Image: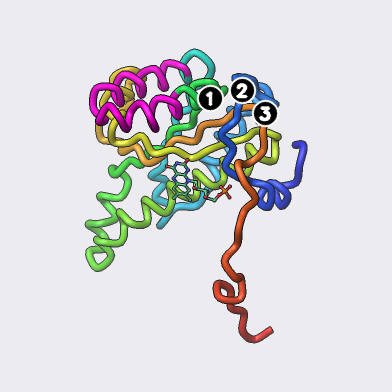
Amino acid sequence: MSKSISDGFKDRRTIYALTNESTISDDRLEQLVRDVVLHTPSAFNSQTSRLVVLLKKDHERLWDIAYEVASTTVPSEVFEKVYKPRIAMFRKAYGSALFYEDAAPIRPLEDKWPMLKDKFPQWSEHASAMHQYALWTLLEAEGLGCSLQHYNPMLDARIAEEWKVPADWSLKAQLVFGKPVGGPGREKAFEPVEQRQFVYGK
Ligand SMILES: Cc1cc2nc3c(=O)[nH]c(=O)nc-3n(C[C@H](O)[C@H](O)[C@H](O)COP(=O)(O)O)c2cc1C
């Protein structure tokens, strides 16, 4: 690993300028994804998260599909100004990790814990976010740049068809990654931390 997790945590930013190269082998990438899937926590250890990773031609295919879908569903002015350049930019990257949640594991838990029934879907969303963040941080530590996208539900059906994703998995986010060719667009501004962090009993 080129950086510590702690440095990956601090250095992680949104990076859009990415190339179709990787700083690590596909085997190493697959191992990191496996670590995220195995070791990220979930409510009641329900293990609801599913990751589908698309590399190279499959990644390009994803963003070709995004182009096709967006060009026929988004108002043309918005498509030209926003979607078209963004999709072209994402397509130039190396890969995309698709984060899904599978509701099947929480159904028995909802039956077993009826007083928590409304919490399980929320916790499933939380678990997905943890997976997203874990992978984003690990990839940063490996020298890869990422941006987090939300082309769901627009692309759900086409992706499910193309990569045989079970219909009842719900797509939550897409992490686009590749070798960075630029830094983050701007310096990050922070709201006063004193108003956001409170420690008592030190
Ligand atoms: C829940 C969540 C949703 C986000 N959605 C998007 C998105 O759809 N498109 C995008 O380009 N960035 C998205 N971002 C990235 C944020 O805009 C970005 O993380 C934030 O501005 C802080 O910048 P940084 O990532 O460089 O630290 C999202 C981030 C989070 C945590």
Say which amino acid is labelled 3: Val
Q: Are marks 1 and 2 in contact (CB under 8 Å)?
A: no
Label at residue 95 = 1
- Residue at 44% x, 38% y: name it: 149
Q: Which of pointers 2 and 3 lies earlier in the amino acid sequence?
A: 2
The residue that appears at 60% across and 27% down in the rendered structure is 18
Closest to the observer: 151 or 125? 151
Residue 89 image point, x, y percent: 50, 25
Magenta span: predominant SS is helix
Report the side of 169 relative to 97 (left or right).
left
Image coords of residue 189 (percent x, y) = 60, 58
The residue beneath circle 3 is 181
Near mark 1 (Cα within 10 A), the count class, few <14, some 14-19 or many ≥20, is many
Question: What's the magenta region?
Answer: 60-87
Q: Can you identify the residue that label 2 sits on?
A: 19
Vertical order, 41 against 83 (above or below): below
Q: How far apart are marks 1 and 2 (CA)?
A: 10 Å
Rendered location of residue 184, percent (x, y): 63, 41
Secondary structure found at label 1: strand
Q: What residue type is labelled 2?
A: Thr
The quadrant in which residue 112 appears is bottom left
Circles 2, 3 touching at the beta carbon (< 8 Å): yes
- In terms of image quadrants, where is residue 21? top right
Graded by Cα atoms within 10 Å as few (under 14), some (14 to 19) or many (20 or more), the crowding at tag 3 reads: few
